[in-house]
Amino acid sequence: MHLLLTSDTHMPKRARELPAPLLDGIEHADVVFHAGDWVDVPTLELLEARASRLVAVYGNNDGPELRSRLPEVARVELDGIRFGAVHETGSAQGRERRCAERFPDLDVLVFGHSHIPWDTTAPSGLRLLNPGSPTDRRRQPHCTYMTAEVVDGRLAEVRLHCL
């Protein structure tokens, strides 16, 4: 199963359109995760139309219409792996411990907010993945998103894509 992970698209403030490689990846993914800060409804509708399956949450910059359509936390089980998505996880310091305490029922947590790619594993075994942002690199060298594979009940081939 092919996964695509993105967050913090901030449309249309940070870009007029999503990057072509991201859109192509969405078309070919079995499941797309978006960890919030869409900013506009048309981007949500674009992903809903193009993704085979969308797992999405709202972020701190998302207004009432997005918040009425999306949860703060989303959970889904894929081939026995328990995934979650949330926008904010707090500061980098202590993140693994905080997230393991808040989400003891998950194997993988996709999050956003910082625009900083992140891939770590908490002592509890919880895998934490932040795909960065495909439209607003902030202080990072590149705009980014992630892909991953679910193979035989395990997460494999997590890859950061630089745009």
Image (spheres, rainbow, N blue to C red):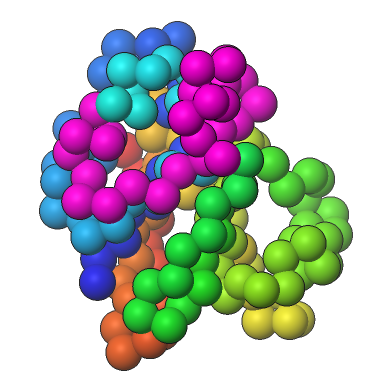
How far across and down, in percent of the image, does residue 35 sit? 51, 42
Q: Which of these two is toward me, 18 or 32? A: 32
- Occupied quadrant, residue 135: top left
| Residue at x 61% of width, y 48% of height | 73
- Residue furthest toward the front? 68
The answer to whether residue 158 is visible is yes
Question: Is residue 139 found left or right of 135 in the rendered image?
Answer: right
How far across and down, in percent of the image, does residue 159 sit? 37, 62
Q: Is residue 59 magenta?
A: yes
Q: Is residue 102 magenta?
A: no
How far across and down, in percent of the image, does residue 45 sit? 29, 26
| Residue at x 53% of width, y 59% of height | 75
Which segment is the magenta one? 46-71
Question: Is residue 88 found left or right of 119 in the rendered image?
Answer: right
The answer to whether residue 143 is visible is no
Q: Which of these two is toward me, 137 or 74? A: 74
Q: Classify the position of the N terminus by image quarter.
A: bottom left
Question: Is residue 33 found left or right of 121 in the rendered image?
Answer: left
How far across and down, in percent of the image, does residue 10 sit? 47, 21
| Residue at x 31% of width, y 38% of height | 163
- Occupied quadrant, residue 3: bottom left
Question: Is residue 137 found left or right of 15 in the rendered image?
Answer: right
| Residue at x 21% of width, y 56% of height | 29
Q: Is residue 104 above or below residue 40?
A: below
